[in-house]
Image: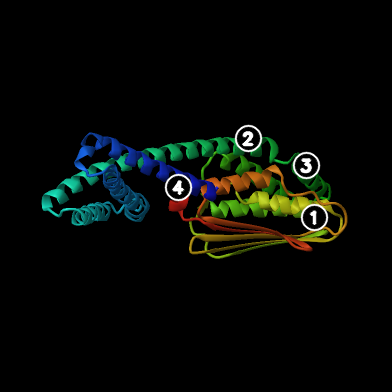
Amino acid sequence: MAKKSLKNTILINIGAFLLVAMLEILGGWLFRDKWDSNYEFYIWQLSYAVVIMITIWMNHFILIPVFYDKKRYFLYGVFLIATIFIISYLKSKSDTFSWVYVSKMFFFLIYATGAGMAAFFLRRNIAIQRENSEKDKLQKEMELTYLKEQVNPHFLFNSLNSIYSLSRQQSPETPDVVMQLSDLMRYQLESAKKDTVLLKEELEFIENYLLLEEKRLSRRCTIEFLIKGDLLDLRIAPMLLIPFVENAIKHGAQSTNEQSTIDISVSVKDNTLNFCVENSIPSIGAVSKRKGMGLENVKRRLNLLYLDAHILKIEEKENVYCVHLSLDLDVSKLKK
């Protein structure tokens, strides 16, 4: 995706340069007789096109990202005017220097830069609207997925069986298990309608899910769930972490009768979440490839919501399947 975006940017700017060069040549076509040869005429007009595009490129790729996008509007204005003045001065020095020439060139570049900015922000707004549209579509897909498909009927059925078994044994754990199942269902229904939830709530959901699965898997699976760091008021997109846990259970403990392990660790430092899930790989029997809807869905959501703020690594070693997600939870980096 990054390569495609870079290629599009290069092609757009090459096209913009050719368009400006063509307009400069056509604009001066009636006065080409003032030059000794057509060669000198074309070189002169192309030099103006180069100056215009250098000004526009410096604005688009340096001044806007460094100052304007960070809301340093005063510094942006100062550096933009200074940049245009310096380029106007250097262009005048390369030709016949005069302050009248500098002022004309200055206002000409102001006009050209303004036109370039209009095209730049128009293209950016179109991209943002397209991205928001895809995000909204994905949000609806997430709601439908988790309300209709991701609420695994087998999980619910087995959880109810566990509750029934505990109740027949008159186990004191029965009320707690019922409340855990209730919390799971409530969280799934409510969080699907939100853009973000508290990280603490997402981790509590995972903990309740693991407690229920432990009851179902009995003693043939050892589950470790560790949390380090201060969660503060950090927020995260809902149901973003649970697909990794579901896959660890589905393709690990659930797919074999032999002893298995699932280790989940969560650490938070400087607004950065490190989430790691490791599960043992069964040595006997075929293990299905992990290309289900859950993982594909979460990868798409990460790319949409945390494009430049996450690193996802998935490794399958000899006996262990490991998922490591590093996620910057700085609210300002979450795409709206």
Closer to the N terminus: mark 2 or mark 3? 2
Closer to the N terminus: mark 2 or mark 4? 4
Closer to the N terminus: mark 1 or mark 4? 4
Horizontal side of 90 relative to 246 (left or right) equals: left
Is residue 239 something one can see in this rendering?
no
Rounded to the nearest angstrom, the CA distance separating label 2 from label 1 is 27 Å
**Residue in front for this viewpoint, 43 or 200:** 43
Q: Nearer the viewer, mark 2 or mark 3?
A: 2
Q: Position of residue 144 (x, y in %)?
A: 63, 35
Residue beneath disc 1: 253
Q: Position of residue 5 (x, y in %)?
A: 50, 46
Residue beneath disc 2: 144
Horizontal side of 313 relative to 291 (left or right) equals: left
Looking at the rendered structure, the secondary structure element under dot 2 is helix
> Amino acid type of disc 1?
Ala
Rounded to the nearest angstrom, the CA distance separating label 1 from label 3 is 15 Å
- How packed mark 1 is, by other alpha carbons closer than 10 Å (few <14, some 14-19, many 20 or more), is many
Looking at the rendered structure, the secondary structure element under dot 3 is helix
- How packed mark 2 is, by other alpha carbons closer than 10 Å (few <14, some 14-19, many 20 or more), is few
Residue beneath disc 3: 154
For the residues labelled 1 and 3, say whether their Cβ atoms are less than 8 Å apart. Answer: no
Q: Nearer the viewer, mark 1 or mark 4?
A: 4
Closer to the N terminus: mark 2 or mark 1? 2
**Residue in front for this viewpoint, 280 or 228:** 280
Q: Nearer the viewer, mark 3 or mark 4?
A: 4
Horizontal side of 8 relative to 121 (left or right) equals: right
> Amino acid type of disc 2?
Leu
For the residues labelled 2 and 1, say whether their Cβ atoms are less than 8 Å apart. Answer: no
The disc placed on residue 10 is: 4
Q: Position of residue 313 (x, y in %)?
A: 63, 58
> Amino acid type of disc 3?
His
